[in-house]
Every structure is written in C-alpha cells, then in structure tokens.
Image (tube, rainbow, N blue to C red):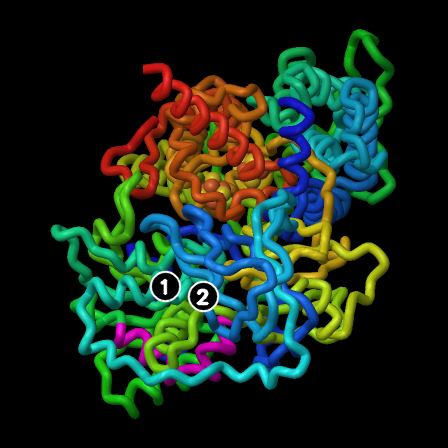
Amino acid sequence: MRAGQQTTDIGSVLTFPHGVHPPEYKELSCTRPIERVPFVDEYTLPLGQHIGAPSRPVVRVGQVVRRGELIAEPVGFVSVGLHSPVDGTVTAIELVDHQNGQLVEGIRIRTDRFSPQVFPPREAINPSTLTRDELIRGIQMAGIVGMGGAAFPAHVKFSLKPDQSVRILMLNGCECEPFLTCDHRVMLEQAEALLDGTMILAGFLHPERIAIAVEANKADAIKVLRQEVARQGIPVEVIPLEVKYPQGAEKMMISAILGEEVPSGKLPIDVGAMVSNVGTAVAISEYFRTGKPLMERVVTVSGTALARPTNVLVPIGTPMQAVVDFCGGITHPEPRILLGGPMMGMVQKNLDVPVMKGTSGILVLTDREVVDPVTYSCIRCGRCVDACPIFLNPARLGLLARKGLWLEMEEQHVMDCFECGSCSFICPSAIPLVQSFRVAKGLLREKKIREQTNQ
Amino acid sequence: MTLSMMKTIISSSPFLRSGLSTPRIMWEVVITLVPVVGMAAWVFGISALLMTLVCVLACWMAERIFLPPAPGASVLGDGSAVITGILLALCLPPGFPFWMAFLGGFVAIALGKAMWGGLGHNVFNPALLGRAFLQAAFPGAITTWSAPATSFFALRGSNLALPFLKGESVDAMTGATPLSAMKFTHQAADWQDLLIGQVSGSLGETSGGLFLLLGLYLAWRGLINWRIPVGMIATVGLFSGILYWIDPAHYAPPQFMILAGGLMLGAVYMATDLVSSPLTHKGIWIYAVGIGILVVMIRVWGGLPEGVMYAILLMNAVTPLINRALPTRVYGHASPTS
Ligand code: SF4
Ligand code: SF4
C-alpha cells in the first residue's frame, strides 16, 4: 500500500493512498523565525486545556506565584498539571471564556510588572536515572499534552500496557494543514531539543525504529534534522513524506511508513506504532533539561487578513487579541478567524479568549479563502470517494445523512470517519459531507450511551 | 435536519474548497465541445451550427421550465443542460428536421433529467435518452444520412421540414455511413479518412483524431475519468481484433471499429457523464468494459449498424447496481462491506 513513491533531492518520498492537495499558503509564514510575544498584564488559564479531567487549583486568590510554578494539579490519570506563565498574583478563580464558547472554571493571574520574568533555573534531571513511572509522572506534572492540536495528555499515550511494545517511534513533523508553519519552525530552530526529547522517549519506550516524518515541502527542515542526527550520532531516520492532506494523521503516517493499517477501533500502538508531535518532544526535552513545564508554546499566526503573518512563542493564557495585535492587527473589515488549520480547525468569533496548550494556529482569513459556496446536488463525480483516506463512500453517506438514515450510515462505517474534511474540500457541489457526518457520529454516540445506561 | 444541526454544519471545517465547482466543471466541458461543433460545421456546413443552437435552446428552455436554479446560481444554469443540448445535436444526422431536434432536446431534459429530480438524480445520460426518443419517434429521419456539405451555407431542405407533414423530403444526396456500409455491404472505410473526419454520419461522428486530443485534455484537467474511454476503446479494439483475426473477410478491422461511428464521441463525452457512470474505479472499469463489449456485439450481431448509444444506455441502467453491489473495503477493516 505504499503509493506514490517518487525521488527528489531529499530522497524517495512515501505516502498513503487517496487524499487531497489543498492550497498550502505556507509561504506567508514559513520563513519567519519564532518571535517571543511580550508579556501582557493579565493571563487567563482555563483548567480544562486538555482532553480529560480539568486540573484542580492548588493556589488561592491573592497568592503570589512564580513563572513556571504549578497552579493546578492533575485530577486522576487522564489529566495534567497547569503552570503560571508569569511571575504575578492570582486575582481570581472563576468562570472564564473558553475557546469553545463556553464558560469554564479558570485561573486569572495579574503579571508582576517589575519582575524580570526569568524562569528560575533548576538542576537538570538525567532522564536515564529515572524509572519509567517517574518519567511518566514527570511528563504529567509538567503539563505536557500533544502539541498537534488535540491536546491529549502526552503521558497517557506514552504509558504502555504490559503486553504492548513499540516497533516504531514516529515523530510527526508533517504539518499537512494549510497555513500552519509552527512545527516547521520548531524543527528548524529547535532540532537539538527535538532530538533530545525523542531520545528521552526512546529511552523508556525501547522502540525498534525511530523516525521523524516530515512532508517534502519542508526540505530545509529535513536537511537540518539529518545534519543534527549525524552530529549526535543517534539512530533516527528522517523520512520525507509526500505533500498531501491529511498526511499528518497518525493512520496516514503509518500507512506511508509501515505500509500497514490500524485496525478499525484500535490505536496505533496496537500495531506497534507510537506517534508524537515534534513540539511535544521539544517540551519533554525542555522539562527534563531545565525543569521548564509547558507554560508557553509556538503558534502560527497567519492569514491573508493579517498585517504581519509569523510564528510566535506565546505564554499560555495570553488573550488572542494581544497575539493578533503583536502581528500587526487585522487588515480586513470582516475577517474570518479560525483556530488551528483551515481543514480541521474551528471558527473563533471572540478574540478575548486565551491561547491554550492545543492552539497551533490563529488564522485571520477573508471571504476569499473561506467561501460559503452555492450547494448543488451530488453529480456522482466520485471525487470524494477518491479523496477519502480511509476509503469510505462520502457520496453515499451524504445521501443517507440527508435522509437522516443514521443507522444505515453506521453500517457504512461512518464511525470510522476521522473528520479530516477531504471529502468536503474536494466536492464540486459543495455538499456539507463531513459536516453532516459529525452530526451523525454525535447522534450515534449519544444513542449508544443511552442504550448502555438503559441496560 | 433541525436548525441547530444546520448551524453546526455551516460553521464547521473544512473552510477551504477546491476551485473546481460543479458549474465550473460543466462549463469547461462546454468549452471543449466548441471545436467539435466547429469541426461538424466545417464538414457538414451551417446546418450543424443551427442544429446545435436548436438543441441547446430546447434543453435550456426545458431546464428553466422544470428545474428552477439553485439559490444563488446563475440564470444560465449549471451548464449541464447546455452539454446535453450540444451532445444531442452531435448525434443527429445533418439533414435532420430542426423541429424534431427541438422536440428531442426538450424531451432529453424533461424525461432524461427533470423527471428524475434534476441534476445528479438521473440514471440515464439525458442526451442519449433524447436521441433514443427520436430514434423511436422518427426512425426514418434519423437514419437518413447526408454526405458532407458541398458548400458551407447550403442548408439541407429537410432541415426546414414542417412538423408532422407526411412524406418526409428525403435529402437527395444520401450517403451511406461507414458503419452501415460495413454492416450491409462489408465495405470498410479507410481509417485515415475516419481519423480526420471526411466521412458521412451524424454531426459528431466525424474526426476520431479530434476526440482523441480532447479526451487527453479532459482527462488531464480531471474533467472526465480517463478509465472510461481507455476501457471502452481497449475493449472494442481487443474484441473486434479477435473477431477480425478469426475471419478478416467477414469482420471489420479493429482500427475501423474504434474510429467509425459514434464510438469516440461516446467514449469521450457520453459514457463519461459523471452522473450516469459509477462512483468507484472498480465500478468504472466494469462499466467501460461492459460498454465496449456491448458496442461490438450490437454492431456485429445486432440489427443496427451502430450500437454505441444503446450500449451506453444499457450500462447506465446497470450503474446504480454497480454502485450498490460492488464491495469496497474500508481502512482498518479486514473484509469488504457492500
Ligand atoms: S469521510 Fe471522513 S475520513 Fe473520509 S474524507 Fe470525509 S472527513 Fe475524511
Ligand atoms: S464529490 Fe460531491 S458531487 Fe462528487 S460524488 Fe462526492 S458528494 Fe457527489
């Protein structure tokens, strides 16, 4: 199943079957080095920044906190720590605006204006002296989540069950979403830390193979990583993958590199693959080498309606408005603001919400890129069938969705759809395919829960 | 669907769209048909242009009457009715009465498309359905072939025949088409003539070479699925090649079978109609090979000299079955589901 091998100056390029080629728009920001956003007066940290149980505050209102200090602790295993991004004072623990439009519990911190805001140095921990459990606990307390956007607690993913083993540890540097360039810049500018974090992970996951997968449009990053691998003399492969969406999806990376499929309903680890975002590996290195928890992250701020697209290092909790202002502000009267990439991200109406751990991109677009197209009926062109990376028949599913035939959709494996949006992107009739599959999946999940509770 | 469902649908990703919209696809196909009509006009004179105009007008009118355009869409429509009109004209003989052509165009849209629920819902290619209607209604007129025009402006008298007058004024210059010559007198035309189009036949049964070029362009632009013409032509070539090899005195050579009649027009423009061809690659191959086999069978053993139209219509009828019955395997599943 290794389709589309081709040769370039970075070597042969692997990929998965199907997929689409959206316009990339990466040139807006891919050459812009990561800039630090200046500190602002107030930070807002929702307690639920990650998938799983929200953290529990360990500070009181009025308490003085240091930069990098733990302000909320994990509750249970699927939960992580939360840290203050600045030296300052806790001003409130109250309901705050979340990116998803809801009010959630959060901590507000007023910045100490006179503090130099340096991170108090701490002695490096040698990860090789720690047990696996200590490492897992460390990653959890450091608040590290998957940096690709889903914000799933990293330590949960890295905890293997006794019968699981890692054949391949894959670092995901594909960054196949249009506009986003933060992983690209991280690979270029933080290659050393990235490889260090990778080797820390390898130290307790004991993979047979270690690979960093990068889409071929980031040839400079591939070269830098290969040089750094050679310099450190470590057994890491840097694998170029074809520029194609959704190449960065875990299943698609596994198809491309291993030529295998993850069985329906299973996880990559069930075929021996552990996939982690490159930014996550950098965060792990930083934590063990300097003690710095996840309190800031690299974000791509881009779009055609933004004065100065670039990549920024932002303290978690910074209001988005401040980040957008730092990038020159918005140049269009009616901008369309998205969080994440345009293929899987979400609309953001309100810029007063904070940057969170899962925020990989803030895009300010116009109605030229984000169109509300006229919808026609399905012309059975089959483009969606050729696009779907998991070989569903979106045309047929779309027809069933229109009629509300959710159970038939389940039979046609709608639950396997991972909502990459390729079908909707390619459909010439602009039929809301993935959009209606989301609705169907939600309803089917609800139905299942109802059935289980009724028993 | 409820209103709140519609809301979540509209405001959710993906926010980017590929540039190729349905009307764009249709109009691009229309543009590629311009040289075909031009070629027909060059070979058959001004009748070809007028015939095209009449058919397009009829289709467009039927579309406006029966199928109101989607909100926000242009009054010109999505272009699909224009394609139907041009394609219908291309499978009519040059001396065909205009009033019949108009009726054919109207029926093509009314019965071939509107009755099914509009664009995307029809099972049969509307142009071919219109053509089949005309074949049934006016069997005499539709098999009256005239030789290529002597002068561009020489309008054929039969073009202007009035509706329902008995005693069709049959064109004096009737010329047998290459296929009927083959069928009934076993004379195969020179294939070079077929390639450049200097033969008598329907308006679109002219230059095989032109369709080859257009087919390549359409496939490169992704406007047609290349598997359909390739599968059809390869099947016809192979099947008729075997027959020719068995008995060259009785059967036509494969290059003749490929270039004669409406095969090239059918392979590039008719069978590739998105709506009436299968969704998946596997299905497309079955469909294309099926048409190829049927074309040869009808031409060689059937009662008609030409079989492309019926072959495509028959496989159109099978398409919903192919779409439904062909098992596909979803990623991560061991066995296919249907
Ligand atoms: S059906 Fe689901 S998985 Fe397939 S292309 Fe559409 S969104 Fe992606
Ligand atoms: S891409 Fe759109 S129009 Fe084409 S088959 Fe799929 S749903 Fe139908």
Magenta stretch: includes residue A197? yes
Q: Quadrant of the C terminus of chain B?
A: top left
Q: Is residue B196 left or right of residue A442?
A: right
Residue in front for this viewpoint, B34 or A181:
A181
Q: Which residue is mark 1?
A: A141
Out of B108 and A204, give the one closest to the viewer: A204
Query: Which residue is denoted by mark 2 in the rendering?
Result: A70
Cβ of mark 1 under 8 Å from ligand 1: the answer is: no
Tell me which image quadrant ligand 2 sits in: top right
- Percent across and percent down for residue A219 are 45, 79
Residue at screen point 83% across, 29% down: B57
Residue furthest left as drawn: A163
Which subunit holds the residue at mark 1?
A
Q: Which residues are magenta?
A: A181-200
Q: Classify mark 1: helix, strand or loop.
A: helix
Residue A101 among those drawn in magenta: no
Question: Which quadrant of the rendered structure holds the N terminus of chain B?
Answer: top right
Q: Are marks 2 and 1 in contact (CB under 8 Å)?
A: yes
Crowding at mark 2 (Cα within 10 Å: few <14, some 14-19, many 20+): many
Residue type at tag 1 = Met
Q: Nearer the viewer, residue A454 or B306?
A: A454
Q: Quadrant of residue A339 in the image?
A: bottom right
Q: Earlier in the sequence, mark 2 or mark 1?
A: 2
Which residue is pictured at 35% across the width and 65% down the height? A14
In the rendered structure, the answer to whether residue B176 lies left or right of residue A383 reads right
Q: Chain of mark 2?
A: A
Measured from the top left, where is residue A238 in percent x and y? 32, 76
- Amino acid type of the residue that numbered disc 2 sits on in the rendered structure: Leu
In the rendering, at what x and y percent does residue A380 appear? 55, 33
Specify whether residue B130 is in view: no
